[in-house]
Structure formats: C-alpha cells, structure tokens
Amino acid sequence: MIALRRSRPRRRAFSIIEMLLAISITSLLLTSLLAALSASFRAYQATTESASRHTIARLTMHRLLAMIRTGTQFGPYPDNVITDPIIQSDYLEFVAADGTFVRVEYRDLDESLYVVVDPLGEPQEELLLTGVAPIFDENNERIPPFTLHYTRGPLLYRATIDLLIVEDNEINLAVEGSDVPPLRMVASTMPRNNL
C-alpha cells in the first residue's frame, strides 16, 4: 500500500508588527482604565472629605449653640451697652448650666476653636475644631467669629457665630490634593436663661 501523505496546513505565528500592535492597543486600554479608576478614587475622596467636614462643622455649631442657649452671665461686654450694645470678639465666656465657667476661643495662629473650662482657676483645655480659617471683609479686615448683642444692661440678647471651615492640613485624606471648597457656617441663638 502506498501511504498517502497528508499535508498538514502550516501554522503561522504572529509577526512582530502584529505583536506590537496588540501590545499598544492593550496598553491604551489599560491606561484609560487606570485614568478612569484614579478619577473615581479622587471623586470618592473629595465626597468623603466634604461630607466629613460638613458633619463635623454642623455638630460643632450645634454644640456651641446648645452651650450658649443654656448658659448665663456672658462676656465679653461692650464698653457701653446702652450706646453700643454689639461687640465682636475672638472669644466667648459664660457660665454653663452645671455652674462651670467656660471660655470658647478662636486662635488665629493654628486656625482652631478651643473650649477652656474654668480659665481663671485650673484650666482644662479641649480642642473643639481645627481648620477654621479667618474671615475677611471687603476692606481686608478680619471679622471675629463671635458677635454678641446685649440688651437691658449686661444681658445677652443674641449671639452669632460665623465660621469658615477649610481643609485641615493636619488631617488630609486626599492622595493628590483636594478640590473641596471651604464651608461657611453662620448661626444665631438666644440664651434661654436671660429672657
């Protein structure tokens, strides 16, 4: 018998040009995928940082307003309550509901709010909020964060708190910087015990 030889089809490998083309297309796809993933991470971090800043600022403002509503014997006083009943200050002093003397002060150097309990005796200092930037008016003069309006002698009628919360350099969650805008919070309250 005569053996018939079947010719097998010859397998052909990829050429170098085809390989380079496949590698370049794959690298383009991976680069675009990594860019989209990086943008997604940055957006997530900005959203997380903004939500965290909003929550902390609201809680701080709520705590300050609650302390003012329940406090008595406020300070600082204006020089003349009758002719000029409004004073702006970097601090606010009062006697808390439990009878302790409390001072809330803004420190421009480290852009922070502090609560000092019993500042005349043995003070106990607590950091209340960091990342509080100074606010400037149209004449480039700094506006103090506390505005106190007195009435009927030394009784506080209304307290207004004006805070500009910015990104805290000490607590930075972002990998490549942050696009989170500053948050300005303004709130007023009246002490219950002065009415």
Image (cartoon, grey):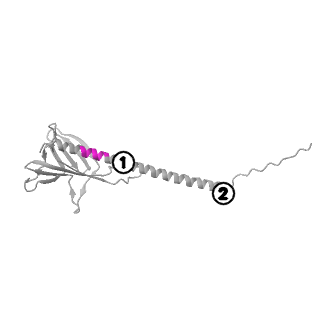
- For residue 49, the mark is 1
Q: Is residue 39 left or right of residue 51?
A: right
Picture quadrant where residue 128 is located: top left
Q: Residue tagged by mark 2?
A: 17
10 Å neighbourhood of mark 1: few (<14), some, or many (≥20)?
many
Q: Residue at x 18, y 44 (%)?
A: 69
Instruction: Report the amino acid beneath label 2.
Output: Ile
Q: Which residues are magenta?
A: 55-62
Predominant SS along the magenta part: helix
Residue 74 versus residue 23: which sits nearer the camera?
74
In terms of sequence position, does the residue under pointer 1 or pointer 2 come before the other?
Answer: 2
Instruction: Report the amino acid beneath label 1.
Output: Glu
Q: Residue at x 40, y 48 (%)?
A: 45
Quarter of the picture holding the C terminus: top left
Q: Position of residue 99 (x, y in %)?
A: 14, 37
Residue at the top extreme of this rendering = 98
Rounded to the nearest angstrom, the CA distance separating label 1 from label 2 is: 48 Å
Say if the magenta span includes residue 58.
Answer: yes
Frontmost of labels 1 and 2 is 1
Quarter of the picture holding the N terminus: top right
10 Å neighbourhood of mark 2: few (<14), some, or many (≥20)?
few
Q: How many marks?
A: 2
